[in-house]
Image (tube, rainbow, N blue to C red):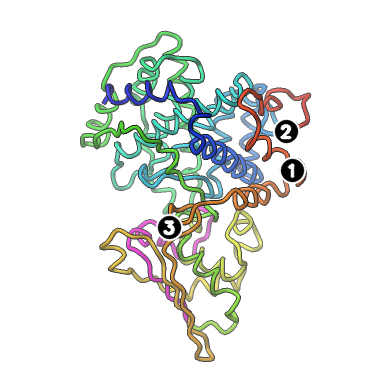
Amino acid sequence: MDAQLLSVLQRLQAVDLDAHPALHTHARWLVLDTLGCITAGLRAGPVAELAQRAAAADPGNFRLTPDGPGLSVGHAALVLAMAACWDEACEGHAGAHGRPGVAALAALWPIASRLTYGQFLKSWVVGYEIGARMGASLRINPGMHVDGNWPALGAAAAVAHALGLTPDQIVQAVNMAACQLPMSLYWPVRSGDTARNTYLGHAAQLGQSAALAVASGITAPAGSVAEYASVGLGKPPVAFDHAPDFQLLKAYFKPYAAVRHVHYGALAAHALRDVIDLDTVDSVVLQIYEEATIYCGNRAPQTPLQAQFSLSFGLAAMLRWGRLDPWIYREPQFQDPALRALEAKVQVQVDAPWTQQGLRGARLLIACQDGSRHEHEVTAVPGDAQMPFTEEALMDKFLSYCEGSLPAAQAADWAAQLLHAPLEAHPFPFWNSPQEKTPC
């Protein structure tokens, strides 16, 4: 695998973002989208508390907001990644069955003030490309969760590139991280505990330490990724994809704060919401592909994490509130009696043809007490290849996620800078300078 990994890194080393406008634009969009998720996640009590405690125990000069607590590079990575995934609204990659970008971004951002925007984006593209390919190659076992696993390999590549290491040294950094990949469990998702939200932060920290170790002359054995697959997963890795395409262009954006499987039913609910009197709903049937029922079968969820993995909750929340964003998971709306009554009425059925053909989609059938029947079918959601995300949708999501954290004008200016600033700009210096009060 090392030879294929090296060939990808050598090819990426020569990439000029200006010569690949689609890649360049998609990278900027993902940066902005992830930052919006971080901004919303930082408002969650446990995330804010962790930031304060980390700053007290291990102070540093990185600030998540201009007036926030000063964090070390490692703890900044932990908090950034945790905030990004707290509301389950961040990017994903279907081929990797995970989110290759979050750990790489969280590992890079604490050192971003030392980089031009072009250097930052290039290092992040390198991290994403390696992370996505590793996710496709290292297929985890049942009971495991991807977040604390292969994302560290992409984070190691991103930080190693930002440190100016050669492609051969970046391979070393990836092998260094592979020698110590943890096995993160799916168990907290089932229980509803938020331990899962620490996994990507751990991956980001491991990526940082692996890159710094190689930069310092510490070595790792060749073939460590394949050895990890054999020992840690009990099976050989799937052939490493070294095709000359860009995996980052296959990254999807989430219009809703929930696992991707939940989006299809939620979008169908949004389409029917305005033509239904919710007080007269008699029954709700959701027909969907089998994989969605396996990963998102939680009923009557009692914690936000359980709800983010619940087909019935996401559908009911959209019917009740007309939205599925971080606000839904805050009180009192999370335990709203009308929402809970709707969720209890939802019946989930597997659609055999979609399942057999490997297709994603949802069919929603709602019967009302007056005898009326309502049906809507969805086979794509915004962010899918068939329904590309738009810059307008991206901006709307970012601005809404910044509400309560930044004034609207400041958030809009921040977004404009990240989307359009020249590559030689330094868009993140205020995070390392408590005196600077402007976002860019």
**Left or right of 184 on screen, residue 85:** right
Who comes first in sequence, dot 2 or dot 3?
A: 3
**Magenta extent:** 283-305
Q: Secondary structure at mark 2?
A: loop
Identify which amino acid the numbered label 2 is placed on.
Pro
Between 13 and 167, the one lying in front of the other is 13
**Left or right of 312 on screen, residue 67:** right
Between 201 and 253, the one lying in front of the other is 253
Who comes first in sequence, dot 2 or dot 1?
A: 1
Between label 2 and label 3, give the one nearer the viewer. Answer: 2
Q: For mark 1, what is the residue?
A: 406
| Residue 396 coordinates in the image, percent (x, y) | 65, 52
Identify the residue at image location x=49%, y=73%.
Answer: 344
Query: Could you give the CA–CA distance between mark 2 and mark 1, rounded to whole angstroms?
Result: 10 Å
Q: For mark 2, what is the residue?
A: 439
User: In which image quadrant can residue 152 be found?
Assistant: top left
Identify the residue at image location x=56%, y=41%.
Answer: 29
Q: For mark 3, what is the residue?
A: 261
Q: Is residue 302 magenta?
A: yes
Quarter of the image for the N terminus: give it: top left
Between 276 and 308, the one lying in front of the other is 276
| Residue 57 coordinates in the image, percent (x, y) | 62, 25
CA neighbours of label 1 inside 10 A, class few (<14), some (14 to 19), many (20+): some
